[in-house]
Image (spheres, helix red, strand yellow):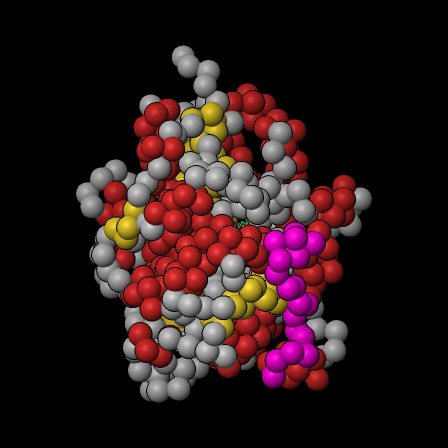
């Protein structure tokens, strides 16, 4: 038996196209609605926020979209990312399961987020955008867009959720290193931020609020556009590079996953890994178990409602049909900042509605235990977000052991945790709390869902 641990794909085999699940869904998705008219949005409705090419990608049903040469050139700074077999972890768990992970922490910003940041910066630069605004939770997305903006000469302004801004000072430093401005949200720079601060000057912030601030500024200036790091269809499209590489690498390994796992904040690293595999299944190929893992304190897929909702707190975005806890729901300040979002990507939500994927929620302490166990055998310190995927992979491997089943597990290790070491310190010092899901607060937020005719 081979003892290979890393499956490196030659750069010459880097996929040249992104994959679009829209082409293969057995049922169409519900249309995106205009927040005022409640009618399906037209491309022109989105033009204040996004360049035309990204709007076209948001709406296309083409199965494959060509990756521009300039984007491929930048991808080659770290792609293809390695597929790694976690042999030492397997041994420690004494499991007959084979555990593989796709490691996205090798990107300059340390996560999967540059896969779409580079594409979005490219299309914006091509369209003459001067400045991009965005939100960030843990800071992974903000630093990715800052990196991409620096390559294309774009100004980048990042609204970072205040609780994460305070918890993760080195992410701010990284954003500034790449030339971006980083502002704690809610801020006094926008109407949305000022309204929240007037009610609660100590508001910890949320991704929904930070999105409102970034969208508000972008909508006000012709040379400024908005970039979103997850949720939207074009983001899932760009992230498909992960799963397409993984398909080739699993072939190199002579193996095939029975179970695919990813953590879900807005759904982009999960979709990026699993949609190319799911697409094969929907075109008549093999079916596999696909598991989305979310935080128990913000359980959008397992407890949320599938309904039309706003993507942000101030209700500036279009309405999308998705799993949601309500746009005014503020998740508690747990450490996986990138998973603190009230909604879920519409494509991931649609896949769950169709029964194509499963969802599971974990509390943070168990995820940190799994992350530490992983680090002690595989060396890589996971970002708190993807510690959820690590925990699910370990649980599935232990189930295989109990059942005596030699299944193949593939999960997305979406980023490293080198900027999240305060979270690890809190864990080691016994200061991490398992924050309960506030069902009553979500009920209040869900009662405010937009009423549609
Ligand atoms: C490393 C990492 N993984 C996962 C996520 C969650 O986002 P998504 O669900 O879009 O992959 C984030 C978000 O910031 C992240 O930084």
Q: Given the current orientation, which residue lies at the most extreme right position?
A: 429
Look at the image and say whether residue 5 sits in the magenta stretch. Answer: no
Tell me if 331 is positioned left or right of 169 in this view. left
Write down the quadrant of residue 200 in the picture.
Answer: bottom right
Magenta-highlighted residues: 173-191
Write down the quadrant of residue 435 in the picture.
Answer: bottom right
Q: Nearer the viewer, residue 131 or 167?
A: 131
Residue visible at 74% across and 48% down in the picture:
422
Is residue 273 shown to the viewer in this render? no
Q: Position of residue 227 (x, y in %)?
A: 48, 65
Q: Quadrant of the N terminus?
A: top left
Q: Nearer the viewer, residue 144 or 395?
A: 144
Position of residue 304 relative to residue 122, above or below, is below
Residue visible at 31% across and 82% down in the picture:
39
Residue visible at 60% across and 65% down in the picture:
158
Residue visible at 24% across and 52% down in the picture:
63
């Amino acid at each position: 038996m081979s003892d290979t641990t890393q499956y490196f794909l030659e750069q010459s085999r880097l996929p040249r196209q992104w994959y679009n699940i829209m082409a293969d869904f057995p049922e169409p998705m519900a249309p995106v609605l205009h927040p005022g008219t409640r009618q399906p949005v037209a491309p022109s409705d989105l033009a204040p926020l996004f360049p035309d090419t990204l709007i076209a990608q948001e709406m296309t049903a083409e199965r494959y979209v060509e990756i521009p040469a300039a984007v491929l050139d930048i991808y080659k700074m770290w792609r293809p990312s390695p597929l790694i077999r976690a042999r030492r972890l397997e041994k420690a768990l004494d499991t007959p399961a084979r555990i593989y992970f796709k490691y996205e922490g090798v990107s300059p910003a340390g996560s999967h987020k540059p896969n779409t940041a580079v594409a979005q910066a490219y299309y914006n630069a091509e369209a003459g955008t001067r400045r991009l605004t965005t939100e960030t939770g843990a800071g992974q997305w903000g630093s990715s867009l800052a990196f991409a903006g620096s390559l294309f000469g774009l100004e980048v302004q990042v609204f970072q959720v205040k609780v994460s801004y305070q918890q993760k000072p080195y992410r701010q430093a990284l954003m500034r290193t790449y030339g971006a401005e980083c502002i704690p949200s809610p801020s006094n720079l926008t109407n949305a931020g000022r309204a929240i601060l007037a009610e609660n000057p100590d508001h910890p912030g949320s991704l929904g609020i930070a999105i409102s601030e970034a969208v508000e500024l972008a909508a006000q200036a012709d040379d400024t556009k908005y970039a979103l790091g997850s949720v939207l269809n074009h983001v899932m499209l760009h992230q498909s590079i992960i799963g397409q590489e993984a398909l080739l690498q699993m072939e190199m390994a002579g193996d095939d996953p029975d179970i695919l796992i990813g953590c879900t904040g807005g759904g982009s690293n999960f979709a990026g890994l699993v949609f190319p595999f799911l697409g094969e299944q929907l075109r008549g190929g093999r079916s596999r178990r696909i598991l989305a893992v979310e935080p128990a304190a913000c359980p959008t897929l397992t407890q949320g409602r599938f309904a039309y909702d706003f993507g942000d707190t101030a209700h500036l975005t279009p309405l999308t049909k998705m799993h949601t806890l309500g746009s005014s729901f503020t998740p508690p300040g747990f450490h996986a900042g990138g998973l603190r979002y009230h909604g879920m990507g519409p494509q991931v939500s649609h896949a769950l509605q169709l029964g194509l994927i499963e969802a599971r929620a974990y509390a943070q302490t168990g995820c940190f235990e799994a992350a530490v166990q992983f680090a002690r055998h595989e060396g890589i310190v996971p970002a708190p977000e993807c510690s959820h995927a690590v925990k699910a992979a370990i649980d599935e491997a232990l189930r295989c052991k109990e059942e005596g089943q030699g299944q193949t597990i593939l999960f997305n290790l979406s980023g490293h945790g080198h900027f999240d070491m305060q979270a690890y310190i809190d864990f080691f010092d016994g200061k991490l709390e398992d924050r309960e899901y506030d069902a009553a607060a979500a009920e209040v937020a869900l009662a405010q869902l937009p009423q549609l005719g």
